[in-house]
Image (tube, helix red, strand yellow):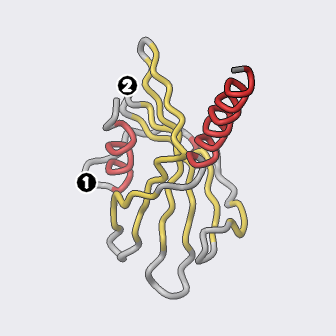
Amino acid sequence: MHKSIQIIAATVLSLATAAPLQAQQPQWVEIAQTGSGDRVFFDTASQVRLFDAGVKQNTFRTVTLATVPGRRSLRSRYQADCFKGTLALRGLELVNAQGTPIRDVPLDRADKDPIVPAKDTIALDIWRYACAQF
């Protein structure tokens, strides 16, 4: 009996540790396309959601894959405040064709300030997707 409890506990523990590892793998969903044809993807596995009284936030990553030769692809980190209707850029990196970061892009303070995305913009598409689940 004791041996079967150990086997069951080991199985549950291995499943519990495997699930977070799988959740860390990017799960990309295409959410927009730029005027130049670049494709914007949302990484659903990167989301960190906060739901509290008066606060509905989602922090997440996107990647914009360049389709025009010579232009770099970007990985961005955003924070959407679904209660206030704002989107803030928290980080930006240049990435290679495999999605591996090449270098960080420095951001001015103004770039990090939350904004209300304008109508018919990619920023609004990103905010809508991030907040759709709240």
Query: Which of these two is toward me, 42 or 19?
Result: 19
Label 2 belongs to which residue?
83
Instruction: Answer whether residue 50 is visible to the viewer in this image.
Output: yes
What element does badge 2 sit on?
Answer: loop
Q: Which residue is mark 1?
A: 120
**Dot in front, 2 or 1:** 2
Q: Position of residue 64 (x, y in %)?
A: 48, 65
Label 2 Cα crowd, 10 Å radius (few <14 / some 14-19 / many 20+): some
Question: Residue at left 54%, top 55%?
Answer: 26
Secondary structure at numbered mark 1: loop
Check disc 1 and give the amino acid type: Asp
Q: Position of residue 11 (x, y in %)?
A: 65, 36
Q: Residue furthest left?
A: 120
Q: Amino acid at mark 2?
A: Phe
Q: Residue at x 25, y 54 (%)?
A: 120
Q: Is residue 102 above or below residue 10?
A: below
Question: In the rendering, at what x and y percent does residue 28 appear?
Answer: 45, 58
Q: Please indicate, yes or no, whether residue 89 appears anywhere in the rendered image.
A: no
